[in-house]
Amino acid sequence: MDSAHELAQRGAAHGTAVRADRQTAGRGTRGRNWESDDGGLWLSVIARPEHTDALEALSVRVGLAVCAALEVACPVLPRLQLKWPNDILLDGRKMAGILCEARWGGGRCLWVVVGLGLNVRNVVPDTLRGVATALVNWAPGATVDALAAPVAAAVAFAAREAGLLTDPELRAFALRDALAGAHVVEPVRGSAEGITAGGALRVRTEAGLVREILAGVVTTAS
C-alpha cells in the first residue's frame, strides 16, 4: 500500500495495481498485523473515484465486486459472505480483508488506495485456523497468478465510484450479509439489521432504537 501511495503521488492513473509476493509488515484495519506469506494475493489498487461523498461504503462496494469475481473464477465455491465492514468470509471463516486508505489535499480526496489481502495457497497460521481459511481448501486449482488480473480489474471497476450504495448493491449485500440477525455485543449491543446506503451498520438496540455505526470492530455473541 505504501508503494501504491507513492505511485499515486507521482500521478499514477486509476486502476494502477501493485502486487507483493509476500509482505513483512502487512497491515490490516486499525493498525493490526496481517500475515502475508508466500501463496497469498497481496494487492493494492490506486483509485481516483468520481464521487467521494460515501467513502465509508467503498469497502462494501469493493467486497461485492471481489466476491463476484472470485465466484466466476472458482465456480466450485459456495456463496461468499461479507462481514461488515471489510471482511470476505468463506464457509464462515475469514478469507480476505479490504483496507481503504484515502489521501486528501485542498479539502478534497485526491486518491484512495484499496488494499486486498486474500488467502489463496498460503498456509494459515495454526492460531487462526478456527477463524480464517484459504481459497485452496475449496478450489484446489486456484493460483495467485490466475486471480491477480481479474481481481485487480474488479477492484478498479468498483472503486470508480465512492458515492452512496445503490439499491441493487444493497440487495446484493443483503444476500451476502454474514451479520444478518446476529446479536451484536460491540461496538453497541443489539441485533444487526443490514447497512445503510452510506455504508453504516444498522444495529437495533435492546431499547428498540436503531443505531447507525460507521466504523468499528464488530463482536457478536457466541
Image (tube, rainbow, N blue to C red):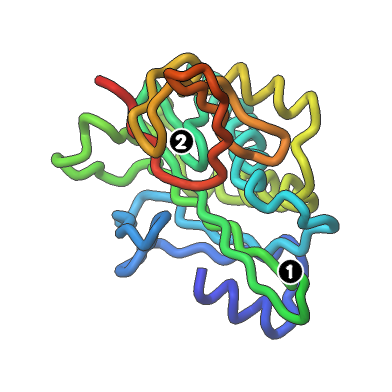
Residue 25 at x, y = what percent? 32, 69
Q: Amino acid at mark 2?
A: Ala
Camera-side residue of 5 and 221: 221
- Mark whose residue sits in front, 1 or 2: 1
The front one of 137 and 218 is 218
Q: Whole-percent x and y of residue 117?
A: 45, 50
Do we see residue 150 in this rendering?
Answer: no
18 or 58, which is in the foreground?
58
Quarter of image, res 21 = bottom left
For badge 1, the amino acid type reads: Cys
- Residue at 42% over, 26% down: 90
In the displayed structure, 173 sits above or below 65; it is: above
Q: Position of residue 65 (x, y in %)?
A: 66, 37
Quarter of the figure with the C terminus: top left
Earlier sequence position, callout 1 versus callout 2: 1
Taking the view exactly as shown, the residue that stands out farthest to the front is: 207
